[in-house]
Amino acid sequence: MQAISGAGYPGISSLDIIDNVVPYISGEEEKIEWETLKILGGVEETEEINTDGTTAKTLSFDMHQAHPLRISASCNRVPVVDGHMECVSVRFARRPPPSPQQVREVLTAYTPEARTLGCPSAPRHAIFVHEEADRPQPRLDRDYQCGAGVSVGRVRQCRVLDIKFVVLANNVCIGAATSSIINAEFALLKGYVSV
């Protein structure tokens, strides 16, 4: 991250009075590392034998035990009202890795299962891939798909890993309120819960 002064005086004038980034948010880095495994792993059905000899099916999170993901996160509190950003670098197991254009195409074409099932609150287009070098930006892009979509930009090759990019999500909408509604709709349509 670069300081406001890196933009030259007067810099970003609306932020001139804000002069801080907090490089630690208690528990957040660990939560991101754990939740990413849970989210990308999905749900698996297992059978357990009860004490009376009957079997019961249970649902649990697939945390990638068979093919573990390695995730490292750093969290900084920045002077933005809404919108969490991530600078992501990825190494792919498959060699050769995909090109930046292939990654852009896959992200653009992605349709979440919640949309396919017909969840009313699911965004029509879950991911928007920006071509501009200076996007996404919280002020301009956090309300994409009424805050339920994700903006991705700067998809490019990484000299250390394979691909790197920037991700922006509206932490209030898709991070909490809207995602809770989508999760409830999804659970109902999948038959995980009934009304």
Image (tube, rainbow, N blue to C red):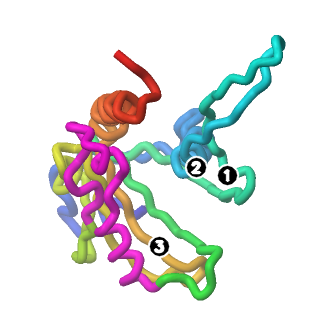
Quarter where residue 30 is shown: top right
Q: Where residue 182 is drawn, which disc sits there?
A: none
Asked whether 107 falls inside the magenta stretch, the response is yes
Question: Given the image, on which type of amino acid does mark 1 rest?
Answer: His
Q: Position of residue 144 (x, y in %)?
A: 19, 52
Badge 3: few (under 14), some or many (20 or more) residues near its Cα, within 10 Å?
some
Helix, strand, or loop for circle 3? strand
Q: Report how far apart the C-alphas of labels 3 and 2 lie in the structure.
A: 21 Å
* Residue extent of the magenta highlight: 99-128
Question: Given the image, on which type of amino acid does mark 3 rest?
Answer: Lys
Helix, strand, or loop for circle 1? loop
Q: Position of residue 41 (x, y in %)?
A: 58, 49
Q: Are marks 3 and 2 in contact (CB under 8 Å)?
A: no
Point out the frontmost of discs 3 and 2. 2
Taking 39 as reference, is 166 above or below it?
below
Taking 83 as reference, is 104 above or below it?
below
Badge 2: few (under 14), some or many (20 or more) residues near its Cα, within 10 Å?
some
In the displayed structure image, the side of residue 109 where residue 76 appears, left or right: right
Query: Which residue is identified by label 2?
Result: 41
Q: Position of residue 158 (x, y in %)?
A: 52, 80
Answer whether residue 118 is visible to the viewer in this image.
yes
Query: Which residue is identified by label 3?
Result: 164
Going from the N terminus, do you reach mark 1 or mark 3 first?
Answer: 1
In the displayed structure image, the side of residue 151 where residue 62 appears, left or right: right
Q: Where residue 64 is drawn, which disc sits there?
A: 1
Residue at (53, 37) in percent of width and height: 25
Q: Position of residue 193 (x, y in %)?
A: 43, 22
Residue at (16, 50) in percent of width and height: 14
Badge 1: few (under 14), some or many (20 or more) residues near its Cα, within 10 Å?
few
Asked whether 156 falls inside the magenta stretch, the response is no
Q: Are marks 2 and 1 in contact (CB under 8 Å)?
A: yes
